[in-house]
């Protein structure tokens, strides 16, 4: 195991080694080098210190995606602060919760949203602004000083707080340490053979694990270059493929790319790796993409509290559709009985638990909740359900909270979804449990039609009948134009459960 070095220190080493190398390539705009980014980081760091940020203080960010946003992240790490990235879609009420909970010393917002936060300023909170073209109060003085010193951090010091999506109640702040970020980044660099020669297409947001702590961290640590896009655009991505080597995306990226006739083996000739995560990739999309391009998409498994846990192999093994691969170096994964914590034989479905240097230290100011999520031997209870297949690959079955218990029987939605998705009239499906007067809960299937198709309930139920025990059969099928998703493409089953909660009126 290499000696610990924080992400900021690793970035500084790259900037000193190759200051003129392009870090950010902005389509239609100028390129930004490692050296230029390092100067921006030092200027922001000086401003943060002037605002009173001391080691351990939180710095909250709600700004549009830009190279400056990455510089703010690195500057926060430089001064020993704790970075708190927040979704730009959050409303004032949602921001009230995060700011009251995390108590940041500085809130950095977009210049056009300054007035929304004016009432928050004062006392222990400074409000700064940061735009997408070195504008905003953090960088508005070209002659502002630079801070060259960096606070010495240990692997155990907090580096960031990321709030979970809050699908089961209020969002919880997962505290990630410098060691969590550095170890996970190193494991991914090794597993995916990522180097300074890579040119990564970055079209993800930067307020969550995938876009910031996987894609950006890997490029910064390796000394690679980023094709840095503010959003996903099919034509732009395909234009960039011949000049890139890696794309990291969510399943929606690949669904959209497959709709373009321009997606060909020739367009992907320089590419060596396509990664998908944050939500399950349909096996049919995995197979269609490989048939079209010659590239098998690499799926991996991670979460806010742990970073990445497993990955399909880069080499030395197949990338299996419907699985998320093997544990990353240094990470342990097991499947256990949810109640007893006893390890289950391969093939049996149970609770997925992980242990390793990537696993967070706990939830911000929630010691009891933290304690309840860890086993005595240090394994973190992920809340996901899965099984280990005959090759040792992990297969995700669903979230524990999505499990349907009908008449005392456990029903795993993914099993039913896989059968429904195989019907030619169905593009994708989501299976949920809703209240039922006789069974406590029962199964409802929500399906999205394939293009030009009109799924029929009776036909779908006939199609899956022979492969499912009777108690697993949906008692209703609802056809919708699209499934509700969060910003990372995950289907929001909690929304569907709410929508159909009164489908079977209780007595």
Image: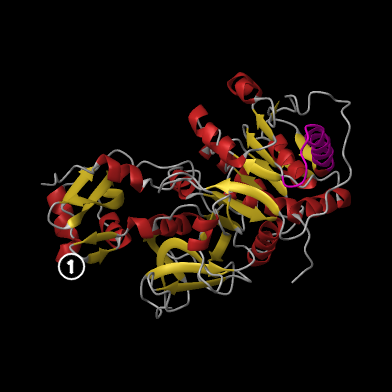
Q: Residues within 10 Å of mark 1 (few under 14, many from 20)?
A: few
Whether residue 131 appears in this view of the structure is: yes
Q: How is the image coloured?
A: secondary structure
Is residue 37 highlighted in magenta?
Answer: yes
Image quadrant in which the N terminus is located: bottom right
Q: Residue at x 89, y 26 (%)?
A: 143
Q: Report the residue that reaches farthest toward the bottom.
A: 345
Is residue 45 highlighted in magenta?
Answer: yes
Q: Tell me: 334 left or right of 349.
A: right
Point out the stretch of residues depicted in magenta: 35-56
In the image shown, does 171 or 208 lie closer to the viewer?
A: 171
Whether residue 451 appears in this view of the structure is: no
In the image shown, does 87 or 274 lie closer to the viewer?
A: 87
Residue corresponding to mark 1: 469
Q: Residue at x 76, y 56 (%)?
A: 6
Kindly state the secondary structure of the residue where label 1 is placed: loop
In the image shown, does 112 or 13 lie closer to the viewer?
A: 112
| Relative image position of residue 411 (x, y in whole percent) | 26, 63
Vertical position of residue 21 compared to residue 467: above or below: above
In the image shown, does 281 or 47 lie closer to the viewer?
A: 47
Dividing the picture into quadrants, the one containing residue 388 is: bottom left
Q: Residue at x 61, y 21 (%)?
A: 119
Dividing the picture into quadrants, the one containing residue 146 is: top right
Considering the whole magenta stretch, tell me its main secondary structure.
helix
Q: Residue at x 43, y 43 (%)?
A: 259
């Amino acid at each position: 195991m290499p000696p610990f070095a924080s992400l900021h220190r690793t970035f500084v080493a790259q900037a000193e080694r190759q200051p003129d190398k392009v870090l950010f390539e902005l389509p239609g705009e100028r390129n930004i080098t490692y050296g230029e980014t390092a100067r921006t980081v030092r200027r922001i760091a000086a401003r943060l210190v002037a605002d009173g940020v001391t080691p351990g203080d939180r710095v909250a960010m709600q700004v549009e995606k830009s190279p400056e946003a990455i510089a703010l992240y690195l500057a926060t790490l430089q001064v020993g602060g704790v970075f708190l990235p927040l979704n730009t879609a959050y409303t004032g009420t949602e921001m009230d919760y995060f700011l009251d909970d995390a108590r940041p010393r500085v809130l950095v917002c977009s210049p056009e949203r300054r007035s929304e936060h004016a009432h928050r300023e004062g006392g222990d909170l400074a409000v700064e602004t940061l735009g997408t073209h070195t504008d905003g109060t953090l960088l508005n003085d070209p002659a502002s000083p630079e801070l060259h010193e960096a606070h010495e951090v240990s692997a155990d010091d907090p580096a960031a707080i990321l709030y979970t999506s809050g699908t089961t109640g209020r969002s919880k702040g997962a505290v990630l340490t410098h060691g969590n970020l550095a170890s996970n980044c190193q494991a991914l660099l090794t597993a995916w053979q990522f180097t300074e020669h890579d040119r990564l297409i970055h079209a993800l947001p930067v307020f969550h694990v995938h876009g910031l702590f996987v894609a950006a961290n890997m490029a910064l640590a390796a000394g690679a270059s980023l094709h840095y896009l503010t959003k996903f655009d099919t034509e732009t991505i395909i234009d960039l493929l011949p000049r890139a080597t890696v794309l990291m995306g969510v399943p929606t990226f690949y669904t959209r790319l497959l709709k373009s006739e321009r997606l060909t083996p020739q367009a992907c000739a320089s590419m060596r790796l396509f990664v998908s995560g944050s939500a399950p990739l349909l096996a049919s999309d995995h197979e269609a993409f490989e048939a079209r391009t010659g590239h098998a998409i690499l799926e991996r498994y991670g979460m806010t509290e742990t970073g990445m846990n497993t990955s399909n192999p880069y080499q030395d093994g197949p990338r299996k559709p419907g699985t998320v691969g093997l544990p990353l170096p240094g990470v342990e994964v097991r499947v256990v009985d949810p109640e007893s914590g006893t390890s289950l034989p391969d093939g049996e479905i149970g609770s997925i638990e992980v242990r390793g240097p990537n696993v967070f230290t706990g939830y911000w100011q929630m010691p009891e909740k933290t304690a309840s999520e860890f086993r005595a031997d240090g394994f973190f209870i992920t809340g996901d359900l899965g099984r280990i297949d005959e090759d040792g690959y992990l297969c995700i079955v669903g979230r524990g909270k999505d499990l349907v218990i009908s008449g005392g029987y456990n029903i795993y939605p993914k099993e039913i979804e896989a059968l429904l998705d195989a019907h030619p009239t169905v593009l994708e499906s989501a299976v949920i449990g809703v209240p039922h007067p006789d069974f406590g809960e029962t199964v409802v299937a929500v399906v999205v039609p394939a293009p030009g198709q009109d799924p029929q309930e009776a036909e779908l139920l006939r199609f899956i009948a022979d492969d499912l025990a009777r108690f697993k059969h949906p008692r209703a099928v609802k056809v919708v134009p699209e499934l509700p998703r969060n910003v990372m493409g995950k289907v929001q089953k909690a929304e569907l459960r709410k929508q159909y909660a009164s489908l079977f009126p209780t007595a």
